[in-house]
């Protein structure tokens, strides 16, 4: 065999192979789909809400005057600096009082609603006959408290009386007070030698049970979703080890749904601060008809306070939230 032919066949050929395009990872594709999903919301914020927010902030620093002209009317703005913020804090004493009252009501609403919704969710997560029907029954108040039904509910004297706990029985006493009297709640706690603050809290819970049930539907569904996401194998392991139901709840269920507790607490805070029954929101709406700039300044201070409360709650609660690590 000829050596020159053998060497010629072994010469390397410089061929550029096309590079394969590296496919995006599953996490990157999920992130891309998430951005596409929230894109309409982001565009709505930037194009619609952001200009309104900027105008609202600017109005809180200016005195608004409507000038009549031949062609209609024009709005004149006179810069006043922090005048309206100072008036809201130091001149208008009702605003500060309503603000303090709203924060106190928040401290009552959040634990009561979250604990009640968690309790109902744990019960409805059990295997029982008619479980879907019971879930629908507990969620019906959420549907009835929205839109047109909410307006009808607010104009209903009976519903208002139930929400405020002041249904008159014709004997000069309220029905809620009669319930407390029949149950002997105050006598029970006085015999246990507890403080009057706890007695007042329990009495208020009984009086506001209608409002608590009415505002626990969404939180209950979130807790149900969290409970159903827990692997049944974990509970089977607990049964094999001989753990009681009480130990299983505090060692398994409660840590696993702690992120849901955080979400529901934040949702309840925002819902309580923005509901139509909130005393601060009602007062700001009443001031708006007389002084737009003052009410705008009150609203922005209220917004900042709400954000600070949420930030403090998240900062403290994050230290106790358990996040399951998944490989």
Image: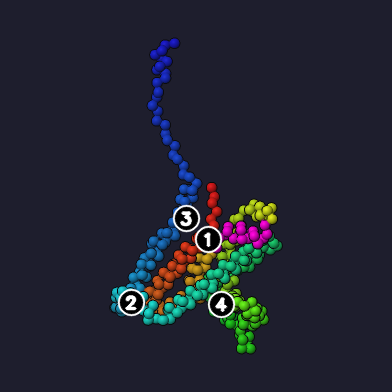
Residue shown at the point (57%, 59%) measured from the top left? 255
Mark 4 packing: few (<14 Cα in 10 Å), some, or many (20+)? few
Q: Residue 83 shows which numbered tag?
A: 2
Does 251 appear in magenta?
yes
Does 135 appear in magenta?
no
Front of the two marks 3 and 1: 1
Q: Residue 259 shows which numbered tag?
A: none
Q: Secondary structure at mark 1?
A: helix
Which residue is denoted by mark 4 in the rendering?
A: 197
Which residue is denoted by mark 1 in the rendering?
A: 320
Give the camera-side residue of 148 and 126. 126
Which residue is denoted by mark 3 in the rendering?
A: 37
Give the camera-side residue of 213 and 91. 91
> Given contact means CB atoms under 8 Å apart, are the residues at marks 3 and 1 in contact?
no
Front of the two marks 2 and 1: 1
| Mark 3 vs mark 2, CA separation in Å | 42 Å
Mark 3 packing: few (<14 Cα in 10 Å), some, or many (20+)? few
Task: Evaluate whether residue 207 shows in this view.
Answer: no
> In screen coordinates, is 254 left or right of 69?
right
Q: Secondary structure at mark 2?
A: helix
Specify which label sits upstream in the sequence, 4 or 1: 4
> In screen coordinates, is 187 left or right of 290?
right
| Mark 2 vs mark 1, CA separation in Å | 42 Å
């Amino acid at each position: 065999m000829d050596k020159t032919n053998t060497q010629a066949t072994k010469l390397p050929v410089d061929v550029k192979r096309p590079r394969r395009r590296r496919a995006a990872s599953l996490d990157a594709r999920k992130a891309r789909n998430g951005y596409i999903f929230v894109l309409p919301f982001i565009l709505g914020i930037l194009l619609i809400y952001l200009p309104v927010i900027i105008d609202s902030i600017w109005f809180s620093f200016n005195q608004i005057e409507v000038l009549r002209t031949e062609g209609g009317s024009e709005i004149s703005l006179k810069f006043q600096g922090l005048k309206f913020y100072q008036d809201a804090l130091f001149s208008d004493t009702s605003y500060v009082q309503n603000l303090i009252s709203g924060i106190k009501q928040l401290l009552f609403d959040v634990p009561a609603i979250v604990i009640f919704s968690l309790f109902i969710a744990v019960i409805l997560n059990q295997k029982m006959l008619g479980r879907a029907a019971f879930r629908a029954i507990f969620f019906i108040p959420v549907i009835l408290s929205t839109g047109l039904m909410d307006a009808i509910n607010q104009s209903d004297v009976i519903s208002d009386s139930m929400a405020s706990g002041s249904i008159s029985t014709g004997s000069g006493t309220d029905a809620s007070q009669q319930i407390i009297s029949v149950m002997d709640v105050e006598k029970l706690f006085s015999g246990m030698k507890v403080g009057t603050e706890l007695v007042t809290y329990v009495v208020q819970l009984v009086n506001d049970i209608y409002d608590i049930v009415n505002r626990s539907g969404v939180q209950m569904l979130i807790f149900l979703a969290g409970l159903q996401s827990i692997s049944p194998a974990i509970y089977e392991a607990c049964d094999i080890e001989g753990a009681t139901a009480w130990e299983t709840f505090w060692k398994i269920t409660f840590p696993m749904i702690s992120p849901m507790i955080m979400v529901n607490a934040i949702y309840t805070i925002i819902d309580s601060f923005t509901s139509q029954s909130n005393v601060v929101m009602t007062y700001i709406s009443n001031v708006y008809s007389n002084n737009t700039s003052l009410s705008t300044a009150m609203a922005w201070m209220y917004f900042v306070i709400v954000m600070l409360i949420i930030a403090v709650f998240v900062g403290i609660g994050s230290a106790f939230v358990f996040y399951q690590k998944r490989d």
